[in-house]
Amino acid sequence: MARPAMNRTEFVELHPELFHMAAGGAWSSIRRLGLLSTTAILDLAGIDGERRVGLEQQRRAKSVTLSIDSIDFVLRDQKPLSEEKLEQCLTDMTVGERLRMLNGKVFLWPTRQRCEELLNARAFRGFQHTIVEIDTAALLERYDVLLSPINSGATLFNPGPRGSTTFTSIEDFPFDRYSKRGRVRAVAEVSVDYAIPDVAGLTTGLWRAQQDRWVPADPRA
């Protein structure tokens, strides 16, 4: 028997806000240019050839900062990802294809709790971050949103199968556990392909955050 799927109304009720975690001080460029995927940043920088392949289709062992028109863009490292383990769990893609897919997306977290978990992770706790809160209903009106049931960029610990169908539409995302609001499968990640250029108009909250300390900021400033 097929599992029932989610619909947009239910998704908005479960996740009325979505969160993006960017490097500290990134809001001025985000407000001007929007949220950009790695692919969009590489396009903006005009990077091609072997350097592009290295940044887009190979694991980044450390973060890379690109300066474009006096704006610094940080391509975060991919330390939670093992290329060897990724290759073993891919169902229908090569490692390069998978990394290019991930680098072509803007990622959002479905809950504040997930952001807090990341802020307290060893790799992030020593740095300040910019947290952008986005109105889910408004985002859905303008963009095609895809959901993932797994942390798609982490393969260090017992990674499950993944491939071209890891990300699905809201309507194709299956329910498979019970919550207070009904039967629902946990959404691990939310993504939009390429960029959200008008994210400033969708932003309902902005914080400067480090570990458990969230300081409100004015998104209009």
Image (cartoon, rainbow, N blue to C red):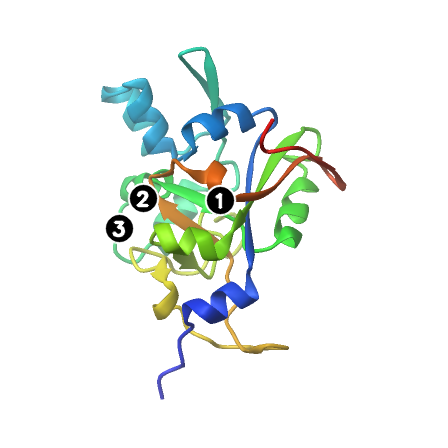
Q: Nearer the viewer, mark 1 or mark 3?
A: 1
Name the foreground residue: 140 vs 26: 140
Which residue is labeled 2 in the image?
Answer: 101
Count neighbours of disc 3 (C-alpha within 10 A) and say few if under 14, some if 14 to 19, many if 20 or more: some
Element under disc 2: helix
Q: Picture quarter containing residue 42? A: top left
Label tally:
3
Q: Position of residue 101 (x, y in %)?
A: 32, 44
Badge 3 amino acid = Met
Q: Position of residue 75 (x, y in %)?
A: 46, 28
- Which image quadrant: the N terminus? bottom left
Badge 1 amino acid = Leu
Sequence-wise first label, 3 or 2: 3
Count neighbours of disc 2 (C-alpha within 10 A) and say few if under 14, some if 14 to 19, many if 20 or more: some
Question: Is the residue under label 2 in contact with that under label 3 (CB below 8 Å)?
Answer: yes
Q: Residue at x 66, y 53 (%)?
A: 113
Question: Is the residue under label 3 in contact with that under label 1 (CB below 8 Å)?
Answer: no
Q: Nearer the viewer, mark 3 or mark 2?
A: 2
Which residue is labeled 3 in the image?
Answer: 93
Count neighbours of disc 1 (C-alpha within 10 A) and say few if under 14, some if 14 to 19, many if 20 or more: some
Residue 202 circle label: 1
Q: Residue at x 48, y 66 (%)?
A: 11
- Answer above or below: position of 124 versus 88: above
Query: Is residue 138 at least partly visible in the picture?
Result: yes
Farthest residue to the right: give it.
213
Q: Position of residue 57 (x, y in %)?
A: 31, 34
Badge 2 amino acid = Met
Q: Residue at x 49, y 36 (%)?
A: 200
Element under disc 1: helix
Q: Nearer the viewer, mark 2 or mark 1?
A: 1
Q: Residue at x 29, y 39 (%)?
A: 96
